[in-house]
Amino acid sequence: MSLRPQLDRLMPALSGRERAIIVLRNFKEGKPQDQGIVRSMSQQDALSYNYLMRLINVCNQELVSLIGLIGQSVERQSLRLVWLFSLTMWEIHALEVNDYLAECTKEPLTESEYRERQRKVRKHPARPKWGADFDVRPDGAAAQV
């Protein structure tokens, strides 16, 4: 025995909500909509069915775009959070470098101190290592050797 006659007898007894559930289930399964579902409805069932079908359409169309926008916003916010985290880490490392420079390095020279040190170096030039064993004599004494 075929199920179709039994379903046709059952259709008038279905409420608008039950019909909307059947349509939604068929949509999710990829089945075509049965036109017999909407033909034999009372006025009250038609109002309920139309209301629920509008809700389904809103969920399938408008909410999808809103969810996409929210997803993009969350992605943008996560990028900002990572950027803020990297700036914070950079600040911590900059403070560590500043502490190192303040505690472990000599105080920088001013330009006048640098010139003074250069003048002292020029007065007493350092001998190269290969010439450390030789005595340096004035020019007049070199001829006597």
Image (cartoon, rainbow, N blue to C red):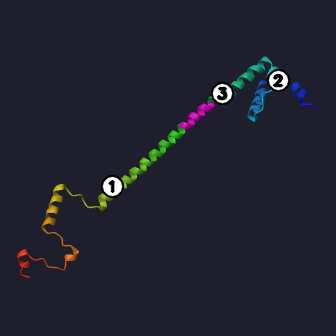
Q: Position of residue 67 (x, y in %)?
A: 60, 34
**Residue 110, quarter of picture:** bottom left
Residue under label 2, please give it: 36
Q: Does residue 126 appear left or right of residue 48 in this picture? A: left
Q: In terms of secondary structure, where does tag 1 sit?
A: helix
Tell me where the magenta segment starts and ends, as one range.
63-72
| Up/down of 47 relative to 83, above or below | above
Q: Which of marks 3 and 2 is nearer the N terminus?
A: 2
- At label 1, the amino acid type is Asn
Q: Which residue is drawn at 42% across and 51% down?
A: 89
| Up/down of 135 relative to 35, above or below | below
Q: Which of marks 1 and 2 is in front?
A: 2
Q: Position of residue 101 (x, y in %)?
A: 31, 58
The residues bearing labels 1 and 3 have C-alpha atoms spaced at a distance of 58 Å
Tag count in the figure? Answer: 3
- Magenta-drawn stretch contains 58: no
Per the picture, the main secondary structure of the magenta-coloured stretch is: helix
Circle 1/circle 3 CB separation < 8 Å = no
Q: Which residue is drawn at 14% across and 69% down?
A: 124
Density class for disc 1 (Cα within 10 Å; few <14, some 14-19, many ≥20) is: few
Q: In terms of secondary structure, where does tag 2 sit?
A: helix
Quadrant housing the C terminus: bottom left
Q: Which of marks 1 and 2 is nearer the N terminus?
A: 2
